[in-house]
Image (spheres, rainbow, N blue to C red):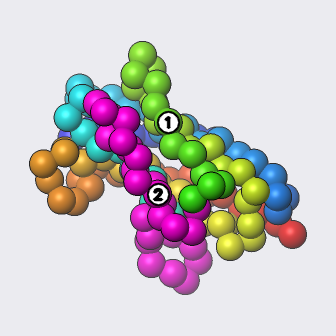
Amino acid sequence: QVQLVESGGGLVQAGGSLRLSCAASGRTLSSYVMGWFRQAPGKEREFVVAISWSGGSTYYADSVKGRFTISRNSAKNTVYLQMNSLERENTAVYYCAARVVREATFGSWGQGTQVTVSS
C-alpha cells in the first residue's frame, strides 16, 4: 500500500484560499490515481478530485470545478489541492487517497486534514 500524509488544512475566511499537500511513500506512483475526498460533519465522504499520476488527467466534482485545482510534483511524490474562493460549505475533513489504475476503489488513505471556512 501507499502511505499518505496530508497537511495544509486550517481555518480560513470565506473567499480565501488554502493549499493542501499529500506526501506519498511506499510505492512507485506511476500506476496510481491520486484523489482527494472530503467529509463534512454529519455527511458521507464525497469525491472531490482525482489525478492520474502518469498522464496527469484530472477529474473534478462539479461542485469544485473552476475553484479547486489538483496537481502533482513527481520529484517530491506529492499531490496538491489548491482551493480558491472557499465557501462555508467546503468545511470538512479532507482526505488524500490512492488507487491502482486498474482497480475501482481507493485502497490507501491518509489520516485527513481539517479545513474550516468561516463567514
The reply to whether the magenta stretch includes residue 40 is yes
Magenta range: 39-64
Residue 23 horizontal side relative to residue 83, left or right: left
Q: Which residue is mark 1?
A: 71
Residue 107 place in picture, x, y as percent:
23, 53
Q: Which residue is mark 2?
A: 60
Q: As shown in the figure, which amino acid type bears the numbered disc 2? A: Tyr
**Label 2: element kind:** strand
Which corner quadrant holds the C terminus?
A: bottom right
- Compare marks 2 and 1 and give the one earlier in the sequence: 2
Q: Nearer the viewer, residue 110 or 77?
A: 77
At x 81% / y 52%, what residue is drawn?
Answer: 16
Residue 30 horizontal side relative to residue 66, left or right: left
- Residue 119 seen in the figure: yes
Q: As shown in the figure, which amino acid type bears the numbered disc 1? A: Ser
Q: Nearer the viewer, residue 68 or 26?
A: 68
**Label 1: element kind:** strand
Residue 85 horizontal side relative to residue 34, left or right: right
Q: Tell me the distance, in whole angstroms, between the alpha carbons under discs 2 and 1.
A: 12 Å
Residue 53 place in picture, x, y as percent:
32, 34
